[in-house]
């Protein structure tokens, strides 16, 4: 996909869907991702911890192609090599993963790099090293990241105000608590279980998207 990266990344932050195989059930992950794309997800991150490299890349190629058919960006969690092999638009790395500058050296300027940030210091360092966006959290305690300490509203605002790149909030965000983030300056929200654990993923995604639009409206 050819795009103005800076503008595309900011728009993509609005409703950022992060996959989790835990709720696949009778559907495939591909089918679940398509449901969230139909519901209006603005970016998909493929997060896989249990697959072999070959299986991950094969699945990622299919999901990347699916996202692109909807005009949506797709990034890979953590795995730079899988990003290069699958044709994904970029990589998201945590504080314990490869540093953003090293990722940029491997991926080149055109790919998107997202970095998890839990403080102003981490946020500014990530931007300095070439991150295109930040994932800021955890906003609430969450079963997906049991070791993440929740940030306050002021913490999140301080982080967003300390950088010029867009931020998406993550961690236990649901339909009924999302608007608590209003005024923090985040460009959107990243959701895992609120999308992929839903019985009707398309409907859940539509509702979350509408709420995210209310969150970021000025």
Image (cartoon, helix red, strand yellow):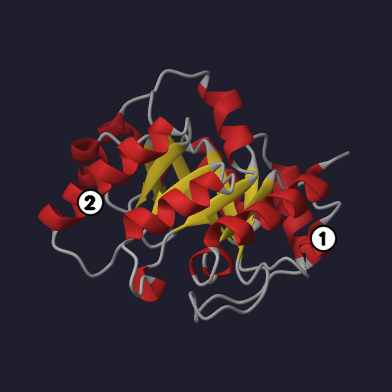
- Side of 78 relative to 61 (left or right): right
- The quarter of the image holding the N terminus is top left
Work out whether residue 184 can be spotted: yes
Residue 203 in picture, x, y percent from top left: 62, 58
- The quarter of the image holding the C terminus is top right
Q: Nearer the viewer, residue 42 or 36?
A: 36
- The dot on residue 19 is none
Q: Nearer the viewer, residue 41 or 120?
A: 41
Where disc 2 sits, the SS reads helix
Figure quadrant of residue 8:
top right
Q: Residue at x 61, y 43 (%)?
A: 13
- Does residue 90 lie above or below 160 as drawn? above
Using a 10 Å C-alpha cutoff, classify the residue at mark 2 as few (fewer than 14 neighbours), some (14 to 19) or many (20 or more): some
- Residue at numbered disc 1: 179
Work out whether residue 93 can be spotted: no
- Does residue 61 lie above or below 183 as drawn? above
Figure quadrant of residue 14:
top right
Find the distance from the CA under tag 1 to the CA under tag 2.
34 Å
- Residue at numbered disc 2: 59
Q: Residue at x 52, y 35 (%)?
A: 132
Residue 15 in picture, x, y percent from top left: 61, 49
């Amino acid at each position: 996909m050819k795009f103005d990266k800076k503008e595309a990344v900011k728009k993509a932050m609005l409703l950022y869907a992060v996959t989790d195989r835990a709720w696949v059930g009778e559907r495939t992950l591909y089918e679940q991702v398509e449901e969230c794309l139909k519901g209006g997800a603005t970016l998909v991150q493929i997060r896989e911890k249990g697959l072999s490299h070959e299986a991950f890349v094969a699945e990622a190629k299919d999901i990347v192609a699916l996202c692109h058919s909807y005009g949506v960006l797709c990034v890979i969690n953590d795995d730079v090599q899988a990003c290069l092999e699958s044709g994904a638009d970029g990589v998201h790395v945590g504080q314990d993963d490869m540093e953003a500058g090293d990722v940029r050296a491997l991926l080149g300027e055109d790919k998107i790099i997202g970095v998890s940030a839990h403080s102003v210091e981490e946020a500014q360092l990530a931007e300095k090293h070439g991150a295109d966006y930040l994932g800021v959290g955890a906003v609430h305690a969450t079963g997906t990241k049991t070791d993440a300490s929740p940030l306050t509203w002021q913490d999140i605002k301080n982080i967003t105000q300390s950088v010029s790149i867009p931020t998406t909030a993550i961690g236990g965000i649901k339909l009924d608590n999302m608007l608590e983030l209003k005024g923090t300056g985040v460009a959107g929200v990243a959701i895992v279980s609120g999308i992929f654990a839903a019985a009707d993923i398309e409907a859940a995604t539509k509702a979350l998207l509408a709420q995210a639009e209310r969150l970021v409206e000025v």
